[in-house]
Image (tube, rainbow, N blue to C red):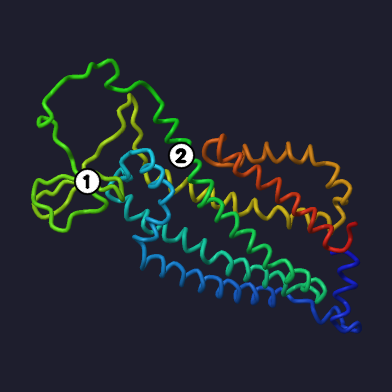
Amino acid sequence: MSVADAKTAAKDVDRDYDPDEYRMSLGDHLEELRKRLTWGLMGLAIAVVGCLFWGERVVVFFCRPLIDGLQEAGMNTALFAGDLVTPFMLYIKVSVIVAVAIAAPWLVFQLWLFVAAGLYPAEKKVIRKYIPLSIVLLLSGMALTYLVVMPLTVRFLIQFNSGFGVGLSAGSSAVEVPAEAVKTIPLLMGDPKAPAEGQMWFNGVDGRLKLRLKDHVVVVMYGPDQLVQSQPLIADYVDLTMMTLLVFGLAFQLPLVVLALFKVGVLELSVLRGSRRIVYFSLSITAAVIAPGDVATTMLALWVPLIVLYEFGILLCVWSGKGE
């Protein structure tokens, strides 16, 4: 903490306070840790129960970038599980992931409270000042992942796979047949209310080809006319999304890291400003290493925000009162 911050914070507290009054014993620290863990886990448990209750909607919401990408490419939107156990385990896993994302601000808040419990009043004021910013940055990183990074990654991979190999019908000649010999499958923006057995239609909303058999409706699998067809596994998508959420959420704490290094005197403002080229290059290497998925989209989607966040960190140093 800088001297300027300490002097400013000291105006709001008694100048004659005894530092020993703010020291905590090991037992006090353990008790505070137990308290914060209890409150944090209680908030997380509430979020998990809520996500499990609306589990199906949560899974659809979590997989929406992949579903939209498949539908835009005219591909089957059904996601494959691989075995009978995977859907149930993914139901639990996705619900917990979304619950952690929802409860993340509360968990970060409890963590800061635990850290602040062992600090002096002036230091507590600095911590409280940047808790909201830390939470906003965390949520911004996760929002960017869901709204921008995953859709871009899905579209890139689908387009790459769609151009892989030649079409299976390449080289075949067109055959003239009577119009009545070619059956037309109706395109509906939804499902018919009471389809008869044997009726088939294409649901344009969810991008699925459906067939009525006896007392239930089944989905007919189809794929693009190419040599190699990809069948997205929902487990792979969930793992990729979870890793991307974690990486972007933590990476978006960069401004606070820059500010902390500036406060403790490790880096000066002139060094931060004069080392932009080196920092930008280092951030590109870092983005390429830690960014999950393909380098072409996920790396750029992480590198550009990191540059912006680095510049924001410099602004925080200036605004803190020690800079120019």
- Quadrant placement of the N terminus: bottom right
The residue under the point 63% across, 53% down is 250
Q: Nearer the viewer, residue 198 or 112?
A: 198
Neighbour tally class for label 1: few under 14, some 14-19, many 20 plus, Cα within 10 Å: some
Residue shown at 58%/69% (left/top)?
106
Q: Which residue corresponds to the image point at 17% horizontal and 51% vertical from the top-left? A: 217
The amino acid type found where label 2 is placed reads: Arg
Q: CA distance from mark 2 to mark 1?
A: 23 Å
Q: Return the residue nearer the eye: 39 or 193.
A: 193
Q: Secondary structure at mark 1?
A: strand
**Residue labelled with disc 2:** 155
Q: Position of residue 282 (x, y in %)?
A: 73, 38
The answer to which of marks 2 and 1 sits earlier in the sequence is 2
Image quadrant assignment for residue 81:
top left
Q: Is residue 312 above or below residue 307?
A: below
Residue that extends furthest to the front in the rendered view of this protein: 179
Residue 200 position, x and y percent, is 15, 44
In the picture, the disc for residue 303 is none
**Picture quarter containing residue 35?**
bottom right
Residue drawn at (71%, 51%) of the image: 309
